[in-house]
Amino acid sequence: MIALEVSSGAGKSFGGVPGAIRNLVEHLVRLDPTTTYALCSRFSRWRRGQVLDCAAPNSCTRVLLDPLNGWFLRDAALLHSMSVFLPATPRIPKIVTIHDLNAVRNHHWVSEHWHTHRSERIELAIRRADHIVTYSDFTARELREQYDLEPSRVHPVPLGVDRARFHPIADERRAALRARFGRYVLSIGLLTPRKNFARLIEAVARLSNVNLVLIGRPSDGAEEVHAAIGRCALQARVHLLERIPLDDLNDLIAAAEVFAVPSLYEGFGLTVLEAMACETPVVCSKAASLPEVAGDAACMVDALDVDSLRAGLERVIEDRELADDLRERGSKRAEILSWSASASRLRDLYRSVAGV
């Protein structure tokens, strides 16, 4: 039996860390039907009914509560925490996934409380773990540098995209969305400063005949976003959306002229692949892990420079040949970076660590 700590995968969110955990679990149990996977939740989550379950016959649910885990997981050969919570027991090989080091290294984007709390949690998990999984080579390098780790302990496992959920759409549906929003640039993410949406708004303001659709829940960068909209007098051209159904999200991505990822820091950047799977051309920041995710299938820009961001958007919007080339390259990139490939790499790691 392989135990997976999946507390952060509970809930309805289909993006970010919860979505990544659920997709990895789904593909692991499908890839490896002869192994039992115990989906483990912290006691605090279990008590509130926040438990990730799976209908697969080779899965079961367990609760985690030190020091009783030796009993709860008595048949487990390995424990992989898919978030930064890693219990001390049982005394079996342990793996932890570190999604990114934003809270550790980028104090200016997080509160002092979150910096301290997250730093302590990550340090504890690293001490307890035999091996560490990251979503990118970028985060693996940051981890080795920050904590002076042996390279053999850190294993980058890129995430994937589900092409059944993210795909191109019919011309009629695209026309209906264009009638509602006009020709538009699309961007997605929590409204936080590191997502760099204020500069994206300024870049769109310097373009003519194109709108911006921004999908994201309000957070500590919401005021900055609204201030940028007001400063650029862009109220009529910016559409702010919060939570939307998955089918609507796919359609909005697929109907966009350009998908923009102006973020200044990402541990991976799943939205890049989701846009590529929809065959929407991507304009992407050169920062952090984004270049390795995008490969040669995006127009890369310096997102700290509004003119660079504006020029990248303009090139893709105006140059039909370039846009078509990016669509083709992006589709191929999304084919390579699949959830099946991610699950297979994790399964290989489990075998090398615990022989199961």
Image (spheres, rainbow, N blue to C red):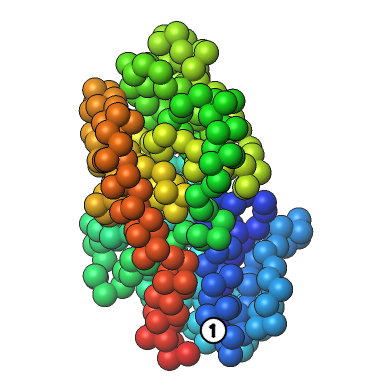
**The N terminus is located in which quarter?**
bottom right
Residue at 46% of width from left, 28% of height from top?
184
Residue at 50% of width from left, 60% of height from top?
163
Is residue 80 something one can see in this rendering?
yes
Residue at 40% of width from left, 11% of height from top?
232
110 and 221: which is toward the camera: 221
173 and 76: which is toward the camera: 173
Q: Say above or below: 269 vs 35.
A: above
Q: Say above or below: 162 vs 153.
A: above
* Three-letter code, disc 1: Asp
Tell me where residue 346 appears, x and y as whole percent.
43, 75
Q: Say above or below: 82 vs 168.
A: below
Tell me where residue 104 appears, x and y as whole percent.
37, 46
Is residue 147 something one can see in this rendering?
no
| Element under disc 1 | loop
Give the tally of numbered discs: 1
Residue at 52% of width from left, 53% of height from top?
166
Side of 108 relative to 26 (left or right): left
Quadrant of residue 333 within the rendered picture: bottom left
Q: Say above or below: 84 vs 284.
A: below
129 and 82: which is toward the camera: 82
Q: Residue furthest front?
A: 172
The residue that disc 1 covers is 32
Q: Residues within 10 Å of mark 1 (few under 14, many from 20)?
A: some
188 and 351: which is toward the camera: 188
Tell me where residue 242 appears, x and y as whole percent.
61, 33
